[in-house]
Amino acid sequence: MSDIAYAPSALPQPIPVREILPWAVFGGLLLLIAIYFIGSEEGAMTLVSGLNTHEFVHDARHLLGFPCH
Amino acid sequence: MVGSLLLRGMLVGILAGLFAFGFARIFGEPQIDRAIAYEEQMASAEAAASGQAAEEEPELVSRGTQAGIGLLTGSVIYGAAIGGLFALVFAYVYGRISPLGPRATAALLALGAFIAIVLAPALKYPATPPAVGNPETIGARTELFFVMLLISIAASVAAVALARRLWAQHGAWNAGIAGAAAFIAIMVVVQCALPTINEIPEGYSADLLWRFRTSSLGMHAVLWTVIGLAFGALAEKSFASRSSHRATLR
């Protein structure tokens, strides 16, 4: 079996960058925005007025290590 | 292919977020409660000293909500986002950096990401429990935290690139050691250069601080362990089904 594992045909084939790029740009952006809302909204800067997001995820923010009030 | 990996990464991230929530609920919450009790005690002592009635902070969200559904929401959304980003990086890294299969690639990538995103930045700017931290410096602290995070990620990418370059001539072990040493050297210099933040009040419980910070690191460790192992298992399946599909097409 170990011989087969090292056969060139078993080497992983990379996924072409042009296939990854659109997903990385749009998906990556949305995911970073999600992290922003959990981590920093209503901390150093505020997009939505009030403190409700901050207070709601307060404990998660502290425990995940984001700077918090 | 990338879309299915991204979806799997986010699903695995949700699962990991649930595990992280369980860990945080058991080990982190008692420390947050202790910190809030200390905060209230300090506030009432201050009010008594100045002869005024203690100012009650209006409670927008109850403690039960913060420690329950709030913590759950935060953990799961964070987990899903990290899982998705992990899948995107995995899609690029797989087959490009090493001949390792999907499971080993996912496990090593998760370990590396934990070190670069959580452990190394936390050595300089660790998690802070309630009652630690001056509200007036939140801007500067947030900036430094994200600067540290970006430098750490950039340093880890540079370290991997260096190791990849040395690999052919010096072998995987020596290349790996050189890459790790480069990462450590960059981080030591950067951490010495960036300003220190110490806003811990006089007499703050050292035990509470230690337990809070270890549970914060533990929560991240649980998250990344589940992502690395579960994503590897799912990715292996999806690569296997793709190659068998190709084989039948031939």
Image: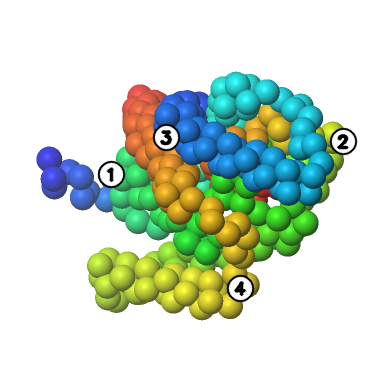
In whole angstroms, how far apart are the C-alphas of marks 3 and 2?
32 Å
Q: Chain of mark 1?
A: A
For image coordinates 62% across by 40% down, the residue present is B41
Give the number of the disc on residue A10: 1
Q: How is the image coloured?
A: rainbow
Report whether B85 appears left or right of A67: left
Q: Nearer the viewer, residue A46 or B25?
A: B25
Q: For the residues tagged 2 and 4, is the chain the same?
A: no
Q: For the residues tagged 3 and 2, is the chain the same?
A: no
Q: Secondary structure at mark 1?
A: helix
Residue B91 drawn above or below residue B65: below
Q: Secondary structure at mark 3?
A: helix
In whole angstroms, how far apart are the C-alphas of marks 2 and 1?
54 Å
**Residue corresponding to mark 4:** B194
Looking at the image, the residue that sits furthest to the right is A49
Q: Nearer the viewer, residue A4 or B228?
A: B228
Q: Nearer the viewer, residue B56 or B163?
A: B56
**Residue corresponding to mark 2:** A49
Which residue type carries mark 4?
A: Leu
Query: In front: mark 3 or mark 1?
Result: 3
